[in-house]
Image: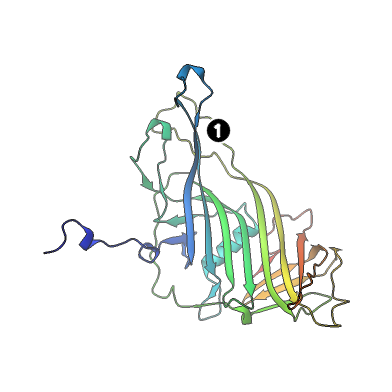
Amino acid sequence: MPYPGNLNRLEVATGLLLRSLNVNNYYLFVEECNINQTQEIDISHQYIQSGPGSAIANIGAKKFEGNITCPIRVDRNNALEPAIIELLRHAEKPTTALRIDTNHIISHYTTTGEDGGSNNNELLSLDSCVIKSLSITGSSDNTDIKLNISFVGMIDVRSALNYIAPASNTLLGRALSWVDTDANRYQSEMRTLNSFELTIENEIDTPTFLMPITTTVATRNDQIGLIGVKSVKWGGNIQEIMRVGMEQHAHIHGGWIVNENMIFNIGPLAVKFNTPLFNISEVPLSAKTLMRKTKWTAMTTPWAPLVQGSLFTI
C-alpha cells in the first residue's frame, strides 16, 4: 500500500523544470539565477505610548534585486546568443530598455501594509531593469568564459509574465573557453596573460515617492518610483606570469596612456579600452611562480559618455 499523502507523487521544483529566463524576449541559458523581491520591514520601539512591546511597523519600498551567472555561448555560426548581446548593450548604455521574465518572479503589487500575509501574489514581468555591475571573467584554469551580472528591477506597468519556451535549436551551441580569447595592447602582446576580468559598474539610485492617501487601494503601491543611473565606470584587471629578465619594459608604472588601445578578443566579441587609466602593477614575491597584477579604469570622451559601441564590438 502506498504511503498516505502526496509524498509518493512529489515532483520537486528545480531550475531545469522552470527553465524560464528571458531577456528582452530572448531565452538565456544560465548556470545560476537569483532574483528576489526586497523590502525593508522593521519594527520601531521609540514610541512610549506603545509600552515595552512592538506596536509600530516601518515598511519600506519594494524592489527586485538579482544576479545571473552564465557562460558566454555561441551558436553553430559562431554568433553570440541574442540575450547575451542584449545584456552587454544595456550594461554599456544603462539608459536603454531591459526586461526580464521568469517564472521565479512572484510579487504582491499593492501596498503591503494594506493587504498583508500571503494573499494576491502574481507572476509579473520586470519590465524596467538596470544592470548595476557586469563582469566577464576568463582564466587558464577555467574552461568557460563567464558573464556575471547584478541588477535592480522594478514593475512599471504591471504587465503579466511573458514566458517564451525555448525554441528547438536554442540549446545548440558551445561555451567560449580560454582558447577562444586573445589580448594585446600597444606596448605588449600580453602573451603571458593568465587571467582577466572586465567590469562595468553603474551607480544606481532608487528613489521612492509617497502616494497620496486619497488614492484608491487598487492603484496604491509601495514600489520604487524609478531607477536612476548616477555614474558609469568601465575597467578591469589582469594577471600575467612573470618571466626572468623579460619584464622590465612591460611593467606598467601607472597613469593614463592615450591610444593605448587595450583590446580583448573573446570569440566574436571585442572589448576595447581606448584610454585606460592604469594603477601601478603589483608583483607579490613568493616561492611560487610570480604573478603580476594590473588594474585599470577606462576614460571616455566627455561628449559621449553613454554611446553604445564604445566598449563592445560584436
Viewer-proximal residue among 90 and 205: 205
Name the residue at 77% across, 63% down: 296
Res. 110 in view: yes
Extreme residue toward the left, this view = 1
Name the residue at 58% across, 69% down: 146
Q: Residues within 10 Å of mark 1 (few under 14, many from 20)?
A: few
Name the residue at 85% across, 64% down: 254
Callout 1 secondary element? loop
Viewer-proximal residue among 216 and 102: 102
Residue 11 in the figure: left or right of residue 220: left
Q: Position of residue 40 (x, y in %)?
A: 51, 38
Viewer-proximal residue among 82 and 5: 5
Extreme residue toward the front, this view = 287
Residue 252 in the figure: left or right of residue 217: right
Q: Is residue 51 above or below residue 259?
A: above
**Residue type, mark 1 in image:** Phe
Name the residue at 55% across, 66% down: 84
Q: Would you name the residue on which mark 1 appears?
A: 209
Residue 170 in the figure: left or right of residue 204: left
Quadrant housing the C terminus: bottom right
Q: Position of residue 41 (x, y in %)?
A: 48, 36
